[in-house]
Image: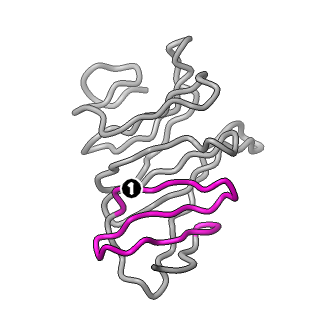
């Protein structure tokens, strides 16, 4: 169940980021190294709903979508990842799609914002803004 120290849903060395869903029923958190686990909680019941590895390196930000129920985005060291809480034949799962940088150099993504149309804008180390659509980098400006 839990990672390391405290058991349950605890993180071995702490949490790097967390967010509350728009309807205020779920909390998502990402633990720091060495596990980098993305956990979705029913915070009122103090129970884990879903848990999976977020990435193999630092995650700086996690955010529930303000527009699409069950969608979460994480970003950090060399990545942005778009998650969906999906019902599969084996039950509820977190399915993540890594952002594809294409011909643009891979960079750390420290900040992002979801736009009402479902696209995302993120920052980059080069000082450019990156526009994401369906996990693909569409343009840099």
Q: Quick check: is 117 in the magenta stretch?
A: yes
- Residue 96: give x, y in percent of width and height: 56, 55
| Residue that protrudes farthest toward the top in the picture | 45
Q: Position of 125 compared to 64: left or right? A: left
Residue at the (56%, 56%) spot, across then down = 82
**Which stretch did the figure color magenta?**
109-135
- Residue 87: give x, y in percent of width and height: 74, 41
Position above or below: 133 against 31: below
Q: Nearer the viewer, residue 1 or 38?
A: 38
Task: Count the numbered circles shown.
Answer: 1
Q: Neighbour class for label 1 at 10 Å: few (<14), some, many (≥20)?
A: some
Residue at the (28%, 19%) spot, across then down = 6
Q: Position of 86 compared to 105: left or right? A: right
Residue 57 occupies which quadrant of the picture? bottom left
Residue at the (31%, 61%) spot, across then down = 77
- Residue 67: give x, y in percent of width and height: 68, 45
Which color scheme does this rendered protein use? one colour
């Amino acid at each position: 169940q839990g990672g390391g120290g405290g058991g349950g849903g605890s993180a071995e060395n702490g949490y790097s980021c967390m967010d509350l869903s728009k309807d205020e029923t779920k909390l998502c958190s990402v633990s720091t190294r060495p596990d980098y686990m993305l956990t979705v909680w029913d915070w009122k019941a103090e129970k884990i709903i879903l848990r999976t590895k977020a990435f193999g390196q630092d995650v700086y930000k996690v955010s529930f979508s303000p527009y699409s129920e069950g969608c979460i985005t994480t970003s950090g060291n060399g990545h942005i990842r778009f998650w969906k809480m999906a019902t599969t034949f084996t039950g509820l799962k977190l399915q993540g799609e890594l952002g594809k940088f294409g011909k643009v150099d891979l960079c750390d993504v420290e900040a992002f914002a979801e736009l009402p149309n479902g696209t995302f804008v993120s920052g980059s180390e080069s000082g450019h803004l990156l526009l994401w659509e369906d996990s693909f980098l569409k343009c840099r400006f």
